[in-house]
Image (spheres, rainbow, N blue to C red):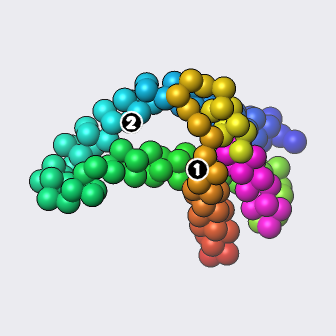
């Protein structure tokens, strides 16, 4: 294998590992810190997008904004993880089907491990719904990658 390709493969796997570390890092926050952090972020996003009036008029959305944001972040984190894993697997010349399966295995395994890990963090509880949301994010990424490869 040429040196440049080795560097690319290495960098691709470092990105996968880095994303897993980021995911587990978020899970390492205790429950109160995690909720506080996400509330701060979601309120800044709402202000930045000038959506304060929209949310004020929709009481249900306003009350659940942090919950919805947290679930959207679950989806997004695992979407990114699956994209990175699919990319790394394609660098080692796996075909589209195998790369899809292994990217899903990496993402879904990480989701399960992440939820089990949260059992050890004060104020955190594992939730099967989160594993499903995480898996849906990974599946969306794999489907998009597969679709794009079909077009190439």
Classify mark 2: helix, strand or loop: helix
Residue hosting label 1: 130
Quarter of the figure that contains the N terminus = top right
Pick the front one: 94 or 18 = 18
Q: Which region is colored magenta?
A: 97-111
Residue positioned 83% across, 62% down in the render: 98
Residue positioned 51% across, 24% down in the render: 30
How many numbered discs? 2
**Badge 1 local density, few (<14 within 10 Å), some, or many (20+)?**
some
Query: What residue occupies the far right of the structure in this picture?
Result: 1
Quarter of the figure that contains the C terminus = bottom right
**Is residue 94 among the parts visible in the rendering?**
yes
**Badge 2 local density, few (<14 within 10 Å), some, or many (20+)?**
some
Pick the front one: 56 or 150 = 56
Q: Quadrant of residue 135?
A: bottom right
Q: Quadrant of residue 141?
A: bottom right
Q: Quadrant of residue 125?
A: top right
Residue hosting label 2: 38
Residue positioned 49% across, 29% down in the render: 31
Residue 124: image location, x then y, percent: 56, 32
In the displayed structure image, the side of residue 43 where residue 130 appears, left or right: right
Given contact means CB atoms under 8 Å apart, are the residues at marks 1 and 2 in contact? Answer: no
Q: Which mark is residue 69?
A: none
In the displayed structure image, the side of residue 68 where residue 1 appears, left or right: right
Instruction: Give the distance between the C-alpha atoms of the residues marked 1 and 2, in whole angstroms.
Output: 16 Å
Q: Height in image: 120 above or below 90?
A: above
In the displayed structure image, the side of residue 132 where residue 69 appears, left or right: left
**Is residue 16 among the parts visible in the rendering?**
no
Residue 62: image location, x then y, percent: 25, 51
Q: Is residue 98 magenta?
A: yes
Classify mark 1: helix, strand or loop: helix
């Amino acid at each position: 294998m040429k040196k440049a390709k080795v560097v690319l493969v290495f960098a691709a796997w470092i990105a996968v590992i880095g994303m897993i570390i980021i995911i587990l890092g978020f899970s390492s926050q205790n429950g109160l810190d995690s909720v506080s952090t996400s509330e701060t972020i979601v309120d800044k996003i709402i202000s930045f997008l000038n959506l304060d009036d929209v949310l004020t008029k929709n009481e249900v959305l306003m009350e659940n904004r942090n919950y919805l944001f947290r679930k959207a972040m679950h989806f997004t984190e695992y979407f990114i993880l699956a994209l990175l894993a699919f990319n790394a697997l394609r660098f080692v010349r796996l075909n589209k089907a195998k790369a899809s399966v292994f990217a899903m295995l990496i993402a879904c395994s990480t989701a399960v491990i992440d939820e089990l890990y949260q059992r050890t963090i004060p104020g955190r509880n594992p939730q099967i719904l989160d594993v499903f949301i995480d898996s849906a994010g990974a599946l969306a990424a794999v489907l998009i990658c597969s679709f794009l490869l079909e077009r190439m």
